[in-house]
């Protein structure tokens, strides 16, 4: 029974002297991060082409059981509608080619489509899935509300993913929209994060969850409890989920992940905890 927990980044100023000591060079933080978490979202590949040598350095910095979840380039997803199909295909194949040497440490690669991609884009989205050439998992995140209608469009979407053994990315932004934006981080999160229904449906063997926590940690208890039950169910079905935990400022994201893992353990006696955070700065300094 395995759950891969990770963050949307492997370094944060607030994690210094907690996840890694001040003296640790920035370039080595991914290695220390990978001693605590077993996966990470890599958003840099969404914004720009990352040099192959840099990808290899990341790959060699982590243990063999670590899993990267790279985001597909925005030229493939967010500019899907405006660009010629041949150009989209070319960028998609080039991206897959860049990931081929990394396959031993790949988790679900993410195709993340913006709200502008409505139900008319579904066939194109599935065509991109059909082109996937790697042996590792693929996942799809959609943000247009048509894909959450619990009727024809969503059924076609889920069926199409299931037939292709592609995972649906389940976005849970309910916590950050549960209160008024009373602080800067909530204002920013409510501007940037999609407000979509949370439909926790697994369409393949590696479901992906993106949980956006509230900065007031006790407010997350209800949703963490729901996710613990769902993750426990998925484990009993033989699935291997990847859970990426965010918070509005990401400072407390590691804490939320640890709380979630503890709840899963309490519901699933045969499950061994996946996540153990450093208990103190003193312990970190001894690593």
Image (spheres, rainbow, N blue to C red):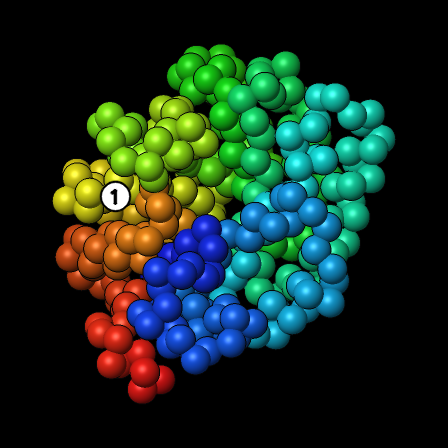
Instruction: Please tell me whether mark 1 sits on a helix, a strand or a loop.
Output: loop
* Residue 261 in view in this figure: no
Res. 148 in view: yes
Q: Quadrant of residue 140?
A: top right
In the rendering, at what x and y percent does residue 148 appear?
43, 20
Percent across and percent down for residue 259 are 21, 55
Circle 1 packing at 10 Å, graded few (<14), some (14-19), many (20+), is: many
Name the residue rendered at 52%, 28% in the picture.
142
Q: Is residue 144 left or right of residue 22?
A: right
Position of the C terminus, as image quadrant, is: bottom left
Q: How many numbered marks appear?
A: 1
Nearest the viewer among 77 and 202 is 77
Q: Is residue 205 left or right of residue 91?
A: left
In the image, what residue occupies the spot 18% across and 61% down? Answer: 269
Residue lying at 54% horizontally and 22% vertically, measured from the top left: 115
Image quadrant holding the N terminus, namely: bottom left
Q: Quadrant of residue 195?
A: top left
* In the foreground, 207 or 34: 34
Q: Is residue 85 above or below residue 219?
A: above
Residue 187's image quarter? top left
- Circle 1 residue: 215
Tell me if residue 265 comes above or below residue 95 in the rendering: below
**Does residue 66 sit above or below 267 in this rendering?**
below
x and y, in percent, of residue 167 in the image: 51, 40
Residue sitting at 33 percent across and 53 percent down?
251
User: Seen from this angle, which residue lies furthest right?
Assistant: 86
Q: Residue furthest front?
A: 184
Q: Position of residue 141 (x, y in %)?
A: 52, 34
């Amino acid at each position: 029974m395995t759950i891969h927990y990770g963050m949307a980044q492997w370094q944060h100023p607030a994690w210094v002297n907690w996840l890694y000591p001040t003296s640790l060079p920035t370039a080595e933080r991914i290695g220390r991060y990978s001693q605590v978490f077993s996966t990470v979202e890599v958003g840099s590949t969404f914004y720009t082409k990352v040099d192959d040598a840099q990808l290899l350095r990341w790959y060699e910095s982590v243990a063999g059981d670590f899993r990267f979840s790279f985001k597909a380039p925005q030229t493939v997803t967010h500019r899907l509608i405006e660009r010629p199909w041949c150009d989209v295909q070319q960028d998609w194949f080039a991206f897959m080619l860049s990931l081929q040497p990394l396959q031993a440490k790949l988790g679900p690669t993410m195709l993340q489509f913006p709200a502008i991609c409505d139900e008319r884009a579904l066939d194109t989205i599935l065509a991109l899935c059909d082109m996937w050439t790697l042996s590792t998992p693929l996942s799809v995140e959609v943000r247009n509300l048509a894909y959450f209608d619990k009727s024809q469009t969503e059924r076609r979407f889920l069926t199409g993913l299931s037939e292709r053994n592609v995972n649906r990315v389940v976005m849970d932004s309910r916590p950050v929209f549960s209160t008024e934006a009373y602080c800067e981080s909530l204002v920013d999160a409510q501007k940037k994060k999609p407000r979509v229904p949370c439909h926790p449906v697994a369409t393949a063997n590696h479901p992906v969850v993106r949980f956006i926590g509230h900065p007031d940690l006790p407010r997350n208890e209800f949703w963490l409890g729901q996710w613990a039950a769902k993750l426990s169910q998925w484990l009993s079905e033989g699935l291997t989920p990847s859970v990426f935990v965010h918070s509005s400022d990401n400072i407390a994201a590691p804490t939320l992940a640890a709380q979630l893992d503890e709840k899963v353990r309490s519901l699933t006696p045969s499950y061994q905890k996946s996540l153990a955070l450093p208990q103190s700065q003193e312990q970190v300094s001894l690593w």
